[in-house]
Amino acid sequence: MENLKLTSIRLSKTTLAKANAIGHSFGYYQTSYVLRLAIWLGLKMFQPGVLRKLSHMMWEEEELGACYTLEDVLRAAGVMLENPKS
């Protein structure tokens, strides 16, 4: 794998702090590694037509204070097709 440097990405302070905390909780992991892993995971979940929905959910969390669970995100991504609570 050829390593390429990403020169600019916009992240909220909350997102960066969360990635930093995750990295430090595992000791030697750097924030950049946590973000690379998050991007990899996100790309695994993306399906056609889901990017708009997930972007809107992210915006609602960051700007409006909404709170989505992992199950909400997976369901919106089409990974979980059934509602486990029903």
Image (cartoon, rainbow, N blue to C red):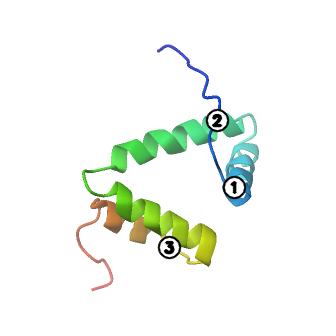
Where residue 76 sits: x, y (%)? 33, 66
Mark 2 lies on a secondary structure that is loop
The quadrant of the picture occupied by the C terminus is bottom left
Depth-wise, is mark 3 or mark 2 nearer the camera?
A: 2
Front one among 74 and 27: 74
At x 53%, y 39%, the residue is: 37
Which of marks 3 and 1 precedes in the sequence? 1
Q: Which amino acid type is marked by label 2?
A: Ser
Asked whether, in this view, residue 75 is left or right of residue 31, the answer is left
Alpha carbon separation for disc pair 3 and 2: 27 Å
Residue 69 drawn above or below residue 46: below
* Residue denoted by label 2: 8
Residue 52 drawn above or below residue 35: below
Alpha carbon separation for disc pair 1 and 3: 15 Å
Q: Which amino acid type is marked by label 3?
A: Tyr
Q: Which amino acid type is marked by label 1?
A: Lys
Which of marks 2 and 3 precedes in the sequence? 2
Q: Residues within 10 Å of mark 2 (few under 14, many from 20)?
A: few
Residue 80 drawn above or below residue 64: above
Front one among 57 and 79: 57
Mark 1 lies on a secondary structure that is helix
At x 60%, y 41%, the residue is: 35
**Residue 44's disc number:** none
At x 52%, y 45%, the residue is: 38
Mark 3 lies on a secondary structure that is loop
* Residue denoted by label 1: 18
* Residue denoted by label 3: 68
